[in-house]
Each structure stands twice: as structure tokens, then as C-alpha cells.
Amino acid sequence: MSKEQPTPTLQDVATAAKVSTATVSRCLNFPDQVKEKTRTKVLKAIKMLSYSPNFGARAMASRRTDTIGAIIPTMGNAIFARGLQAFQDELHLHGFTMLVASTSYREDIEEEQIRALVGRGADALLLIGHARSPEIYRFLEAQAVPALVTWAFDTNLSRPSIGFDNQKAMCRMAKKVIDLGHRNLALVSAETILNDRAKARQLGIEDAMVAANLCAKTLHIVKTTYGIEEGATAFEQVMKAAPQTTAVFCGNDVLAVGALRRARELGFKVPQDVSIIGFDDIELAEIAYPALTTVHVPHREMGRRAGAALIKLLNEGTQIEAVELEASLVFRDTLAPARN
Amino acid sequence: MSKEQPTPTLQDVATAAKVSTATVSRCLNFPDQVKEKTRTKVLKAIKMLSYSPNFGARAMASRRTDTIGAIIPTMGNAIFARGLQAFQDELHLHGFTMLVASTSYREDIEEEQIRALVGRGADALLLIGHARSPEIYRFLEAQAVPALVTWAFDTNLSRPSIGFDNQKAMCRMAKKVIDLGHRNLALVSAETILNDRAKARQLGIEDAMVAANLCAKTLHIVKTTYGIEEGATAFEQVMKAAPQTTAVFCGNDVLAVGALRRARELGFKVPQDVSIIGFDDIELAEIAYPALTTVHVPHREMGRRAGAALIKLLNEGTQIEAVELEASLVFRDTLAPARN
DNA sequence: TAATAAAATGCAAGAGCTTACATTTCTATT
DNA sequence: AATAGAAATGTAAGCTCTTGCATTTTATTA
């Protein structure tokens, strides 16, 4: 503990095993290029010295890292955590390593993290949503780091993405809601400025309203941050400002669960008095009481596919082809025909 | 896109700005050591080239990385995700970067990940739980990488840890349960071989039983993997094998929520017929119906403190002092006196 | 204005690894 | 046993930065 022992290097191993550094290196990277006997000797030296290769040096010398970076808004949100886990599992399967960073939904931090991951040698990047400054896309291009957008899907953009169309999915759900006779709609949403998914979901409802000859302007929107309590508060605001509301859409299940709870606390019967609709279909949705009607997002599938696509791109140079996944509607117990 | 543009290097920037590489480097690392005019020039060149420093090279040359690694079992579990987020926030505050890896509760993968993170130059490591082979601890020592154990606390070990005593916490809860007249206890637990937290929780119940003159052997234990459905199945197994059971402890809230659901599906009244107790106190616990009685674990506090301690160690060389956090009991609606 | 100290910059030696190419050691064949 | 060809190993350059020391520029003082 007290002695300043420098961490062992390739050279140390080579010396201990009485071979050249090249042989040790090959032993690690191309084991079958070295004779069994030599290999054993080297491996023993490695173990003895508790040697571990220096990644930076290796990356620099070999010009590749087998590392893919992922940048998500927050790990506190189960849907990202879960998608990432699937992503990571897929990468691990192919010998790649994942580096994660989170942005707390802040654009400046996202930029910082993108630079950090690129600097760390990420061979490719996984990003959430399309919305970010052109400068960042330029940077990525200058660094020749391919980026794949997920959690969103938009045919209008040239960027490859693997995800689903938030707008379309929410529109389908809204149509159902309107078909059940609801005319006074509200939306509890996350901030839409830096979150194109949230924005798309809002647009989806508005699309359905217009299609049903309702004025999109009548959609009562309350914006809030992420959290159960936040959802509860927002619900209260909605019902105070627009008491005639019969259906409250929520930008995600966590907000919806909060709304649900507050609804009950305030004496509303769900769904008889007011319907509540979530988005994501996390476990919470099923557990909530009454069980939440929501839009199912294929998080794991998305993560897995994104991983596979990026690996294919890196290994075979195959261009990523955009994949639109299906987000299905899950009808449980918080949606019913409008009262009266 | 077609031209193989090599990513820009420090040298490129230096050339573009007509200064030496040393100046560019200082511009990045010690901005006030370089004249305003020069700095502007350099910064412009950097922006123009979309330059981003190569982390590996920097790490190698400067022998430090300002990076801390965290290794958790899985991101799919909210409690780890949340603790990590707090950890990351704390690190970010001090200019450190976090590298995460997950192990899927597999020892071999954990070892692999530890080596990977150390190889990537992690200045320190955050680990969950104490249980791992001595060889790994030896490796960490050989590499002079300090490691902090969290999510657990054990005064008997010399290793520094910031966490809570799983055994003590569960024992307190079990005591309450026994005080309510429960004599036939069961436990739905995660696999305890590689999970010392799960093991400790089990021991905690047994401690309480012994203290109450119950035979610890009568604790009916069912082991399962993580998941709501898994918890449900395990509950069913418990009640089939030991129908006289009046209180079912669960290793975590997710299992408990599953048990709760299956209990209702099977026609058990909770808590009248059977009490169900969780562990962790994640959001799910509060949302579950009836709301779950559980042990509150200070995830965020743990993450934050762990971050702070590691940074202090790295920056000031201050030895980490172990901190035992309090895990409190949260009584909600799934615990009641034993029937009869 | 000259002399001196302080600030800014440049030079060049590494940091630990990979890999093209050169050299040595085997294996198999005649 | 000699030799070609293959397999194994070694040599050394180069990957991109940081930093101690040397040098140049700028500011300060007499």
C-alpha cells in the first residue's frame, strides 16, 4: 500500500515471460498466432503481474475501440434504462463495450457528453430523438462517427433511425378516445422544447382532433417535469382550469400514474368521471389501480435492434436502414366512454 | 462523405493556428497560461476543424483520466439506475466522468467489466456489495485502483463501504412482523449465491426469528429471478407448499408487487389473509394496491455520498471513511396482524 | 534606454500499445 | 541431410497527447 508500485505494462509482461512485446500483444489479440508453449508462459506472467492492457494506448495504436456510446436523457426513467440494458446486452454479445452518459434533458450537457464520448473513442453513437443543433451533427460528421437515432422515427429526415412514430401512435390512441365520445381533452406533457418525442405526441393528439373536426386549440395543455408527484399536480391544474375535461392524456406513464392518484384523491372516479391515458407501458402501468390504458413502446426491441444495426455498420460497413417499429395500443381500465 | 478524412489531431490544430502543439494543449488544459490573443486564434482553429481531443492519448500522457467506473448488476432495476444517476450527477459537478457497466448478476462478467474499466483508466471504481473473489481485490490493488463498495455495509470488513446494513434492516422489519403475531413466514428471494444483499436480507429475517424463539429453519424460502411475473409465480409456489403462511417477505419491491398481484388473483385478501413485505421502496411500492409495506433504501443519498467520497479520495488523497446509512421501515397497507 | 524579471511559447521526450516488415525457428519434403 | 516454405517471434515506428526545460517575448523598473 505504501510503495508506489507503477501499474504493470506490456513491457513488464514481456520481460517476465522473456519474449518481445509483440508476442505478448499477439497473445492477447490473436492467440492462435502464437505457439501454445509461449502462450502459456505469457499468460502466466500476465496473471502473476495482474496485468491489464491500457485501453487508451491500445486504441491509439490500433485505431479502433470496439466501443459504442449511448446518450440518454436520464437513467432515472425506466424506459431508457431498459432500452439501454437491451442495447448493452446486444453489444456485449459481439464483444463491444457500451459507454453511457446522461444529459438531464439539457442540450448543453448533451453536447458535452457527445464530445466526451467521441473523445473516448466511441466508434459510433446512439442518440435519443432527432432534435439537436446542426453543429453537433456537423461535428459528428467531421469526426466520422456514425450516429443512430432511436426512440423516434421520421421518414422526412435523412438520418437513420430505429424507432417508432410518436405522433402516429398517439394519433391512433387519440382517435379511439374521441370515438368514445370525448370532446374536452387535456394533455399533461413534458417540456417540448428539447424533447421532440413529447412534441410529437402532442401533435398526434391534435391531428386526431382535426380529423374529427375538433379545434386543436381546445386541447388543454399543462407542461411539467418528470415524476409521479408532478403528474399529480398537473392533473389538479388541468381540472381546475378546465373542469369539463373528460380525458387526460399524459406524456408518459409516470405522469399518468400521478394523475391517476390525484384523480382518486380528489374524488374523481376513473374512468367513469375522467379517463386517463399514459404512454410507454412500463410496469407501473399494469400495476396502477385501475390499470392504465397506454401506448406500448417496444423499448427492448428498440435497444436490441439499434445495437445490432450499429454493430453491422461497424463490422461490415453496411449502411443502417431505418426501421419503423410498431407501438401498440394497450387498453386497460382507465379509459371509458365520455360521461353524458 | 466519400473522402477518408482522418479525424483532426492536436497537430492539425497547431498548424492551422500557427502555434506549437504545446500551446494548443495548454489552451485546452490551462487556458490562463496562454495569451488572450493566442487563445482566440487556437479556439477558432479548434472550432473550424471540429477538433476533439483524443482521450486515450491524453490519459496516457497525463496519467490521469478524471473518470470513475461504476459496475452494477443491471440497469433494468430502478434502484440501481436511480442510485447511479445521483452518483453521476455528483461526479459531473466536479468534472469527473462516469463509466457504467452492468453484469447481469454474473461474476465472470463482473470480473471482465472490472478489468475493462480499469483498462480504460478508471481512477476509481464503485462496486455493489462485497461478495467477489479475492483475486479481483488483489487485481484492484495491483493496479492501485481504489474501490468503494456500496449498497451494503459491514463493519467486519476492512474495505470501505457506504451503504446500509441489509441484515439489520430486514431484521427490524421481521421483528415487527413477528410482533404482529406472524409465526409462519416465507421469503421470496433473489438467488443468494452471488448476491450478498439478498443473503443478508434472508439472514436478517432468521435473526429476528431466533430472537423470538422461532426456529429459523421454518422460514420457507423460494428463490427466483427478478421480475413481477417471477414474483407472482414464486408467491404461488409458496402458498402451495406452505399454505399456513401468513406473511411473505420479498427480496425486493418488484417481486413483492408480483406476489401481491398473484395473491389477489388467487383470492387471498391482502393483508387480512396474508401480509406481503417488500424491500427498496421504489415508486412501484407506493402505487401498488394495496400500497406496499417495505424497507426504504436511500438510493440517491447513497449514490451522492459515494460520488463525493470517491472524489475526495482522488483529489485530496483522503481515505474514505465508511458511512452507515439508515434504511427506514415504511408501513403501508400490506402488513396486518396475523389471521387468527 | 538598458537591464531584469515574468510571462508566453516552443522543443522534444515520453506514455503503453499494435503491426508491417525482418528475422529466426520449425516442418515437411526430397 | 539439405532446403523450401510456413510458422513463430522480434524490431522498431507510429498512434496523439502532456510537460519539463529551453527559448523567446513582453512588461517593469531604475
Image (cartoon, coloured by chain):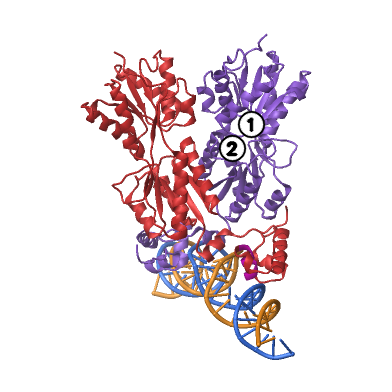
Chain colours: A red, B purple, C orange, D blue
The quarter of the displayed image where residue B174 is located? top right
The quarter of the displayed image where residue A27 is located? bottom right
A226 inside magenta stretch: no
Which residue does the image show at 50% across and 40% down from the upper left?
A: B89
Which residue does the image show at 74% across and 39% down from the upper left?
A: B157
x and y percent of residue B81 in the render?
A: 53, 37
Q: In this orientation, which residue lies closer to the viewer: A232 or A294?
A: A294
Q: Which residues are magenta?
A: A21-28
User: Can residue B61 be spotted in the picture?
Assistant: no
Task: Tell whether A101 sits left or right of B174.
Answer: left
Check disc 2 and give the amino acid type: Arg
How many residues crowd around disc 1 within 10 Å: few (fewer than 14), some, or many (20 or more)? some
Mostly what secondary structure, the magenta segment?
Answer: helix
Check disc 1 and give the amino acid type: Leu
For the N terminus of chain B, the image quarter is: bottom left
Q: Which residue is mark 2?
A: B305
The numbered mark, 1 or 2, whose residue comes first in the sequence reads 2
**Secondary structure state at the residue bearing disc 1:** loop
Residue B325: mark in rendering: 1
When the figure is inspected, residue B75 is found, relative to residue A117, above or below; the finding is above
User: Pointer 2 indicates a residue of which chain?
Assistant: B
Q: In this orientation, which residue lies closer to the viewer: A329 or A80?
A: A329
**Do the residues marked 1 and 2 share a common chain?**
yes
User: Can residue A315 be spotted in the picture?
Assistant: yes
Residue A192: mark in rendering: none
x and y percent of residue B42 in the render?
A: 39, 62
A25 inside magenta stretch: yes
x and y percent of residue A233 in the render?
A: 40, 23
When the figure is inspected, residue D7 is found, relative to residue A68, above or below; the finding is below
